[in-house]
Amino acid sequence: MKRISHPGGSVVTGDELADAVMHYAEALARRSQVDVVDLPIIGESGTLTRTQILIGAPGGMTCVGAESVHPDLVEADTVHTFRLKALAGTASGRASWTGDGLDSPQFDEFDY
């Protein structure tokens, strides 16, 4: 689990969800844009709930590991959506370099 801190407070959510939100927030900030994201969280009372957070250009966010007695929150469709939104509008298809594609064939490996 990870705790996302934002100007309005902080929330605890799953590792992949938090990473995807941070990646999307970075992409939005680079584009000087904002968006509201909806994601599952562990509420203050320990129950599973949802939150909406404004992310992007206007404010900074941090993300740190968080202890929880609950299993990691997983919502693959939401993670996928955030990742696609982060890539939207990028010329290369990547908002930032992740090391992906290092095993791609190089031009000199093709027969011309």
Image (spheres, rainbow, N blue to C red):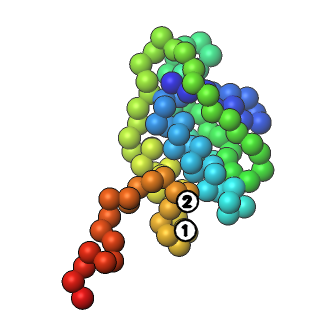
Residue highlighted by disc 1: 90
Residue highlighted by disc 2: 95
Query: What is the quadrant of residue 86 in the picture?
Result: bottom right
Coordinates of residue 76 in the picture (x, y in percent): 38, 41
Residue type at mark 1 is: Thr
Label 2: few (<14), some (14–19) or many (≥20) C-alpha neighbours in 10 Å: many
| 24 up-or-down from 65: above or below | below
Label 1: few (<14), some (14–19) or many (≥20) C-alpha neighbours in 10 Å: few
| 46 up-or-down from 2: above or below | above
Proximity of marks 1 and 2: CB atoms separated by less than 8 Å: yes
| 86 up-or-down from 53: above or below | below
Q: Mark 1 falls on what kind of element?
A: loop
Q: Mark 2 falls on what kind of element?
A: loop
Coordinates of residue 49 in the picture (x, y in percent): 53, 26
* The residue positioned farthest toward the front in the image shown: 108
Residue drawn where x is 49% and y is 31% of the image: 15
Q: Is residue 45 left or right of residue 54?
A: left
- The answer to whether residue 35 is seen in the rendering is no
Residue drawn where x is 38% and y is 59% of the image: 102
| 52 up-or-down from 30: above or below | above
Q: Compare residues 96 and 99 and report the one nearer the observer.
A: 99
Q: Could you tell me how far apart the alpha carbons at marks 1 and 2 are, in whole angstroms?
A: 6 Å
Coordinates of residue 23 in the picture (x, y in percent): 56, 48
